[in-house]
Image (cartoon, rainbow, N blue to C red):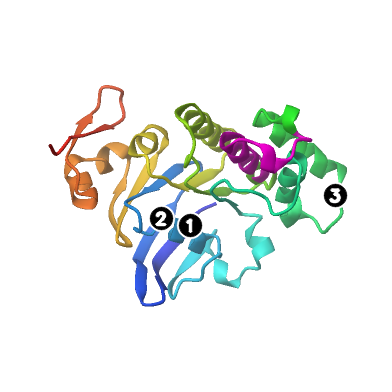
Amino acid sequence: MKVEVNRVCFSYGNSAVLNGVDLGVECGKVVSIVGPNGSGKSTLLKCMDKILKPQKGVILVDGKDIGRLQQKELARFLGYVPQSGNSPFPSTVFEVVLMGRRPHTNWSVSSRDKEIVSRALEEMGLEGMALRYFNELSGGEKQKVLLARALAQEPEVLLLDEPTSALDLRHQLEVMNLISSMVRKNGISAVMAIHDLNLASRYSDWIILLKKGLICAAGEPAAVLLEENIRNVYGVETIINHNSGKPHIIPVDPC
C-alpha cells in the first residue's frame, strides 16, 4: 500500500495553507511531518483522510484517487487518529474501540468484530479498562484508546494528528512506542504530525519538514534535522548531537 500526495494545494478562504505539496509514503514506514504552528501539518493529514478537500492536486491510495472513494471504502485503507478529546456520548472504552469496525460492517456486530476489538485492547494494555467510560480517562489513556480504535479498523496506513500533544514525558514515550510497535507488527505505515523534533528523530524512518505549506526538506532524520534547516524553518539556533545514533536537537539560548 502506497499513499501519494501530488501537488496538493489547500486554502482557508484567502489564506493559503498548502502550496503544492508532493510526498509518497511507502509501506512499513513511520513518517513524521514537522514544522512550526500554521505550517500545514494537520491540514495535510485531513486532506489525506478526505476530511478536507484540496483546491488543487490529487491524493492516491494504492493508485486510486481518494476523491472518487466513498468515506467508508477509504476507511478500510486509512485510519485517522485525532488529537485526544471527549466523546459527545457516554461511551465505554470497548464501545469506542468497536467504532473502528464500522468500515467493515453494517450495524450488526459479529463475533469476529468483538475478537478484533478485544485483541486491540489487549495489545494496547487496555483490557482492564474495557467497561470504563472514555470521558473519565486521562489524556494518555484516551490516546491509547484512540490508537486501539484505529488498530481495530485494520487500516494499512495510520494518520496521526499530534499523538503526543498534552501528554507528559512518560505517556509520550509510551504512545510513540505503541505506534512504532503497531507499524512493525502489522506491516502498516504511519504518518504523523508532531511538534517534538527529538521524538520525531527517535521514532521516524522519514521526516517531512514543512514551512508555510511547502516542503523544505524530506529524508531520513539525519539528512533533515540539520542546524541550517532548523534555523531556516524555525528561526532558532541549535546544536545537533549524534551520540545516540539519531540527531538530538539542543536549542541554543539566544541570550
The answer to whether marks 2 and 1 mark residues whose Cβ atoms lie closer than 8 Å is yes
- Secondary element type, mark 1: helix
Judging by the rendered image, the residue that carries numbered circle 1 is: 45
Q: Which residue is mark 3?
A: 109
Q: Earlier in the sequence, mark 3 or mark 2?
A: 2
Left or right of residue 12, residue 255 in this image: left
Identity, as a three-letter code, of the amino acid under mark 3: Val
Q: Where, quadrant-wise, is the C terminus in this rendering?
A: top left
Amino acid type of the residue tagged 2 in the rendering: Lys
- Where in the figure is residue 3, as x and y percent of width and height? 49, 56
10 Å neighbourhood of mark 2: few (<14), some, or many (≥20)?
Answer: many
- Amino acid beneath label 1: Leu
In reply to whether residue 48 is colored magenta, the answer given is: no
* Disc 3 packing (10 Å; few <14; some 14–19; many ≥20): few
Residue at position x 35%, y 36% in the image: 201
- Identify residue for label 2: 41
Percent of width and height locating residue 133: 74, 40
Name the residue rendered at 43%, 45% in the picture: 31
Residue interval drawn in magenta: 130-149
Drawn side of residue 237 relative to residue 159, left or right = left
Q: Main secondary structure of the magenta part?
A: helix
